[in-house]
Amino acid sequence: MCLFFSILFFGPRFGLIVYWIGWPARWELAFDSWVWPLLGFLIAPWTTLAWVLCAPGGIEEFDYVLIGMAIFIDLLTLAGNGGSYRRRATASGTPTY
């Protein structure tokens, strides 16, 4: 557990890389192809990390909450990036369209 929280401290993408190198069999159980982990790494890293933690043993009660929170965090991250871009663009005088 301590390793898990240490990885999360550095960010989800770092955690995905460490988890993929350390436990590749878990990835094979969680995903059928390489496409979903790659898309998850690029677009929704928290959701991908939660899925790798939950899916190999089967999705049960609290797993739905964990995956739902990960989806929520990814959506907040994506929405927050757009807002910070708009603030930077208007502060620098660049028009936003």
Image (spheres, rainbow, N blue to C red):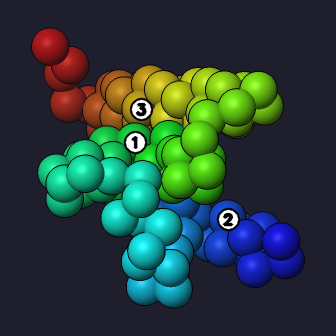
Instruction: Give the alpha-carbon distance from disc 2 to disc 3, as whole Å.
Output: 18 Å
Instruction: Give the alpha-carbon distance from disc 1 to disc 2, as whole Å.
Output: 14 Å
Q: Which residue is mark 1?
A: 44
Res 75 visible: yes
Q: Position of residue 79 (x, y in %)?
A: 44, 24
Disc nearer the start of the sequence (2/3): 2
Q: Quadrant of the C terminus?
A: top left
Residue at (42%, 53%) from the top-left corner? 30
Please tell me whether mark 3 sits on a helix, a strand or a loop. helix
Crowd class of label 3 (few under 14; some 14 to 19; many from 20; radius 10 Å): few
Asked if 39 appears above or below 13 in the picture, the reply is above
Disc nearer the start of the sequence (1/2): 2
Instruction: Give the alpha-carbon distance from disc 3 to disc 1, as whole Å.
Output: 9 Å
Q: Nearer the viewer, residue 22 or 40?
A: 22
Q: Position of residue 46 (x, y in %)?
A: 53, 47
Residue at (19%, 59%) from the top-left corner? 34
